[in-house]
Image (cartoon, helix red, strand yellow):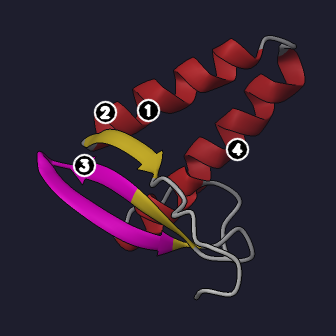
Amino acid sequence: MARTILYTYKDEEKELTFSYQEYHSIQEAVAAAEGIDITAYLKMEQQIEAVTRDKKAVRDYRDNHFRKLGFGRITLAQKENRGVGKK
């Protein structure tokens, strides 16, 4: 099921349709949408995950890296609650 990502890139609000079938994380999706190559970032993230058990270290690294790339807020939009039988 597709979700919507709300993000800020270089002080411009944007939204993007996202599916976990195509990308592993919302950060990968927004980087691809903006044409940014993050292969070096992904390698470093794997190394940090292998070295530490602290998930906060990985999250801090991710947040700082994407802030340096020019991204602000990156979040999934709220799911819309629909009644039974409505599309």
Residue at label 2? 68
Residue 77: image location, x then y, percent: 45, 55
Say if the magenta span includes residue 15: yes
Few, some or many residues within 10 Å of mark 1 (<14, 14–19, 20+): some
Q: Which residue in the protein does label 1 denote?
A: 65
**Magenta span:** 6-17
Res 35 seen here: no
Q: Amino acid at mark 2?
A: Lys
Distance, label 2 to label 1, CA atoms, is 5 Å
43 displayed left or right of 18: right
Q: Residue 28 location in percent, x, y?
A: 55, 58
Query: Which quadrant holds the N terminus?
Result: bottom right
**SS at mark 2 in the image:** helix
Please tell me the numbered disc located at residue 8: 3
Foreground pick, 79 / 81: 81
Categorize mark 4 by other alpha carbons within 10 Å: few (<14), some (14-19), many (20+): few
Distance from the alpha carbon under mark 2 to that under mark 3: 13 Å
Real-space Cα separation, disc 1 to disc 4, in angstroms: 13 Å
Q: Which circle, 2 or 4, is nearer the viewer?
A: 2
Tell me what residue is drawn at x 60 percent, y 76 percent.
Answer: 2
Amino acid type at mark 3? Thr
Whether residue 39 is visible: yes
Q: Nearer the viewer, mark 3 or mark 1?
A: 3
Amino acid at dot 4: Lys
Please name the residue that numbered disc 4 is placed on. 43
Q: Residues within 10 Å of mark 2 (few under 14, many from 20)?
A: few
